[in-house]
Image (cartoon, helix red, strand yellow):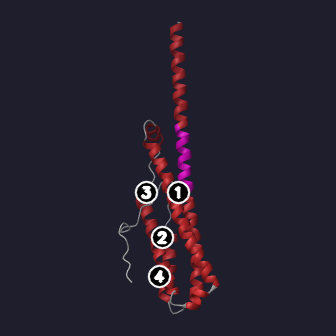
Amino acid sequence: MKKGILVSIVVVVVLVLIGFWIAGRYNMMVTMQENVENAWAQVEAQYQRRMDLVPNLVATVKGYASHEQETLVGVMDARAKATQITVDPANATPEQLAAYQSAQGELSQALGRLMAVSERYPDLKANENFKQLADQLENTENMIASARNMFNDSAKEYNAFIRRFPANIVASMFGFDRKAYFEAEPGAEKAPKVEF
């Protein structure tokens, strides 16, 4: 009789310890998943900052270079397209991130063309408002790159954690899936040609 009670107590203790271990792993995965989603929110915040700068920049350039209508329309169209694509960080797939990144890349290219237009207008380049907006845009691009790196770091840490044994058992029990990464644009591995 005492042996049966002792075995029962040991079994209960082992089950309780396993339960605490599972709960600890689960809670760690939830925390890491929240970190990934927070990192994504930081990426979106920086892209939103850029979106907010674009109309002001276009309006400033328009005052000096109104006949550059094609470039100005291209920037606003790229901005509109970029705002239409949203990604749910909890369920983001590599394809969704690629589409988001592509739309943002198109906006970056359009902004590059807009900045090139400004080179043709010395009065525009000397305009204090334009200088401030251009500086803010440059800072925003740096913050976007930083936020994307932080997102990838958070996703990497989370992905590694849920794939390691024995945490992978808990991850599969509760449906914790891998997170997608931001990846380089196609052709980014080739250095651009610079000709003088």
The count of marks equals 4
In the image, is 188 to the left or to the right of 64? left
In the image, is 112 to the left or to the right of 46? left
Closer to the eye: label 1 or 3: 1
Which labelled disc corresponds to residue 93? Answer: 3
Q: Quadrant of residue 49?
A: bottom right
Q: Residues within 10 Å of mark 1 (few under 14, many from 20)?
A: some
In the image, residue 145 above or below residue 106: above
Percent coordinates x, y for residue 67 in the rendering: 51, 93
Residue visible at 56% across and 45% down? 31
In the image, is 184 to the left or to the right of 127? left
Q: Look at label 2 and name its amino acid.
A: Gln
Residue named by callout 2? 104
Percent coordinates x, y for residue 174 in the rendering: 48, 41
Q: Report how far apart the C-alphas of labels 1 and 3 lie in the structure.
A: 18 Å
Residue visible at 46% across and 66% down? 100
Q: What range of the chain is rendered magenta?
A: 25-38
Closer to the eye: label 2 or 3: 2
Which labelled disc corresponds to residue 113? Answer: 4
Q: Residues within 10 Å of mark 3 (few under 14, many from 20)?
A: some
Residue named by callout 1? 150
